[in-house]
Amino acid sequence: MLIDNYAYLNKLKDVHPAEKLLFALATMAVGFIPNALLNLAIVLMMGTVLVFKAGIPARIFLKMLLIPFSFIIIGMLTMMVNVIPAGSNALIKLSLPDFNVGITLESMKMSGLLFSRSMAMVSCLYFLAFTTPVMDIVAVLRSMKVPVLLLELMELIYRFLFVLMETSEKIYISQASRLGYINAKTSVHSLGRLASSLLVKSWRDSESLYISLEARGYDGELRVLTRSFPISQRNIFFIVLAEFLLLILAWLFRG
């Protein structure tokens, strides 16, 4: 529950969650401008705010950025390698009996843009996750009249995600201590047992949670106490200035 711990202990925890949500969403919207340099600037800006303003260790932020790296690389490769029409220029081309596949300059540009944009979006999400507890985000969304059912699903999924992660780690350590992953065959068997155990536990936990809610008068809506936050004109000015500077950067380096 590393991210959740920082969400409650960071230096920006007392900032109005609507301001942090606005900053993250506005920066994500600007990040859709097709400009790789702009996306790099967004990653640097979010990292700077997290490290120097929120007090998140730089190694933690970099470590979290590496988590979706492999998925993004796979997406880059699928976009970079395409079927090439006959007679078109290609940097690398492989001729097959019925068609040609290869890498063109345009596909490299598109894959590079995909990589930079994905990292920019991930950094915006990490800013929101590292600085804002999920209950504060839900409170803001509830004030925006988001359907209650969707908000409750967000709360429950977020909670059970960490529960399942902690449980899977304990089961894995227990299996590994009994040589459950000593070879490929045993590893596959142990992994299947781990998945089935998680399925059973998640089912039992959901049943126990529903029974406990019914015992406390659950009527279809989860009601929790929320804190009140002051709105800072200084923060609003910073958000507007940051987005304005990003737009200027995108305009200066357009094309």
Image (cartoon, rainbow, N blue to C red):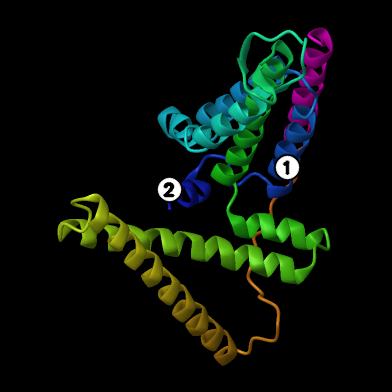
**Which is in the foreground here, disc 1 or disc 2?**
2
Q: Residue furthest left?
A: 178
Q: CA distance from mark 1 to mark 2?
A: 23 Å
Residue 154 lies, with reference to residue 73, above or below; the image says below
In the rendered structure, find residue 36 and report the number of the disc placed on it.
none
In magenta segment, residue 242: yes
Classify 10 Å Cα crowding around label 1: few (below 14), some (14-19), many (20 and above).
some
Residue 192, quarter of picture: bottom left
Q: Is residue 240 left or right of residue 158?
A: right
Mark 2 lies on a secondary structure that is helix
Most common secondary structure along the magenta stretch: helix
Q: Amino acid at mark 2?
A: Leu
Q: Amino acid at mark 1?
A: Glu
The percent coordinates of residue 125 (x first, y second) are 63, 41
Return the residue at label 1. 19
Identified at 52% across, 86% down, the residue is 212
In the image shown, does 23 or 25 lie closer to the viewer? 25
Q: How many marks?
A: 2
Is residue 175 visible from the viewing direction of this image?
yes
Residue 30 lies, with reference to residue 185, above or below; the image says above
Residue 22, quarter of picture: top right
Classify 10 Å Cα crowding around label 2: few (below 14), some (14-19), many (20 and above).
few
N-terminal-most mark, 1 or 2: 2
Task: Quarter of the image for the C terminus: give it.
Answer: top right
The percent coordinates of residue 134 (x first, y second) are 60, 56
Return the residue at label 2. 2
Residue extent of the magenta highlight: 235-255
Identified at 78% across, 23% down, the residue is 241
Residues at discs 1 and 2 in contact (Cβ within 8 Å) = no
Identified at 60% across, 21% down, the residue is 44
In the image shown, does 150 or 204 lie closer to the viewer? 204
